[in-house]
Image (cartoon, rainbow, N blue to C red):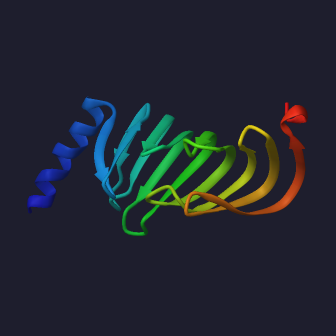
Amino acid sequence: MIRKAIMPLLLFSIIVLGPIVSMADDLDTVISADQISINPDNTLQAIGNVFVKQGNVSIRAEAMTVNEEKNQIEFQDIIEFSDGNSLKLTGKNAVLTDDLSSGIITASQVLIDDTIRIRAGEIELKNSTLYRAESIDRITSCKNAK
């Protein structure tokens, strides 16, 4: 009963107040998008100009779905992913853990320390580190990266 009363209030807050600020693993998380909704299965969906910032990690994408039950976040058409340190990337799709530190990103272009660019069919992040790259099609130095 309480849950049914809270859901409309939560949805109203999300839509009217714009960017969402919440706590996740003791890190502030900010989510903004053109449209944000909560689906009947309690997943949060954001569409259009999606921006997520959690700690040092920031992601810009066209769409995002948060599934708390699975502890994962799916992104579509990643425009920019930055770990706030040395890793920047773009990609087609991603399935990441809810703390954004691990997961798989497809059709990726990765820039490491502004010196090495890797174009791969799939990369895997583990603990915020590039762990694996598959179907590498090109590796270039920064001098040739553009």
Which residue lies most toward the left here? 1
> Residue 113: image x %, image y %?
71, 42
* The quadrant where residue 102 appears: bottom right
At horizontal 88% and vertical 48% (from top left) the residue drawn is 139
State the residue in front, 143 or 137: 143
Q: Classify residue 56 as left or right of residue 7.
A: right
Of residue 117 and residue 40, the one placed in the foreground of this image is 117
Which residue is at a point 25% across and 43% down the rendered structure image?
11
Q: Nearer the viewer, residue 142 or 1?
A: 142
| Residue at image coords 56%, 50% | 75
Q: Is residue 5 above or below residue 56?
A: below
The quadrant in which the C terminus is found is top right
Q: Is residue 47 left or right of residue 132?
A: left
Q: Position of residue 115 (x, y in %)?
A: 79, 40
To which quarter of the image does residue 26 belong? Answer: bottom left
Q: Is residue 1 left or right of residue 34?
A: left
Residue at 43% x, 31% y: name it: 34
